[in-house]
Image (tube, rainbow, N blue to C red):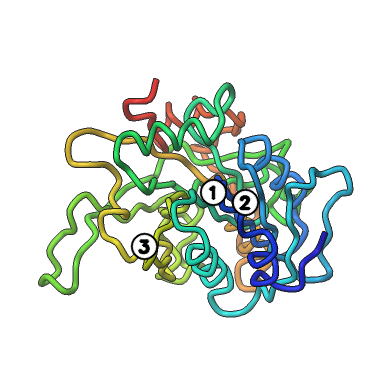
Amino acid sequence: MRYPSLADLLDRKRADLGRGPLSLVLAEDDVALNETLAHQQASGFRDVVLLAPDSVTIAPGLDDRIHVVTHDVFAEGALVQAVNATIARFPGTWLHYCHNAEFLVFPFMETRRVREMLTFHAEERREAMLTTVVDLYAGDLGRNPDGVALDDAWLDRKGYYALARKDAASDWQPRDRQLDFFGGLRWRFEEHIPYAKRRIDRISLFRARPGLKLLHDFTLNDDEMNTYSCRWHHNLTAAVCSFRTAKALRTNPGSRHAIPTFRWPNSVRFDWTSQQLMDLGLMEPGQWF
């Protein structure tokens, strides 16, 4: 069923959707869309809300727990506004957000589901989880000119780094347990990436509560929820494996002809396992074994 607006869906399905965990997917086009939705369901999200223009449709075989909403996906802050509207309606619910052609990968996802992970995380008194955005890209741009190929996906095994996040309100002193992460395509092709878009960290898994807001840099308005771990030990982190940067670089006329290939000596094929990302240090299980 398609809903005319997010507000209409939230009004009709409030009691149902609030059980969570809930995933919001904003689709700018139909690239890898069905695969993204199927992945969210397989990961264990009880419901998935697809925000998409009328021209975008999904495969008929997908489960009825996907709720399609007509949405102006190209409006300024379209995803952030949708997330904040959902936060306001569902205090206590775990939420996740992403775009199409982005895939949440978490430790041990092959045998466990996202609800199990979030239950453990909540028992550690954590209400948010850092997710690293790992740029994926097609290995052969001749065969896949848009940079997207799920069956020939590659990623960088090196070139990632983090800098202390500074607080302008405290004379630019480092914020406690907060880092800005960089790497991937946005590091290697930074001349084509606006400065504000170069970070590869998001808080894309969190528990909603009254007054909480997602900001335009994909952090939350509660500093503690932007930290990578608690004060006493390391916590779980996850990854959002994303073709979005590759697709943008291949779509933009200013970069398309300047990039004949994304592969370099430190490219490795992505095997779609959580162990590979843990081995590369792109996420960690913390105390969850």
Q: What element carries label 1?
A: strand
Labels 1 and 3 touching (C-beta < 8 A) = no
How far across and down, in percent of the image, does residue 141 sit?
72, 50
What kind of residue is marked 2?
A: Phe
- Indicate the quadrant where residue 57 lies: bottom right
Residue pictured at 12% horizontal, 70% vertical: 170
Callout 1, which amino acid?
Answer: Asp
Mark 1 or mark 2, which is nearer the start of the sequence? 1
- Which residue reaches farthest bottom? 76
Instruction: Name the residue that disc number 2 marks.
Output: 243
Task: Say which quadrant the N terminus sits in.
Answer: bottom right
Residue in the image at 41% along x and 53% along y:
201
Depth check, front residue: 231 or 152: 231
Residue 62, above or below 204 = above
Q: Is residue 50 above or below residue 230?
A: below
Q: Mark 1 points at which residue?
A: 135
What kind of element bears circle 3? loop
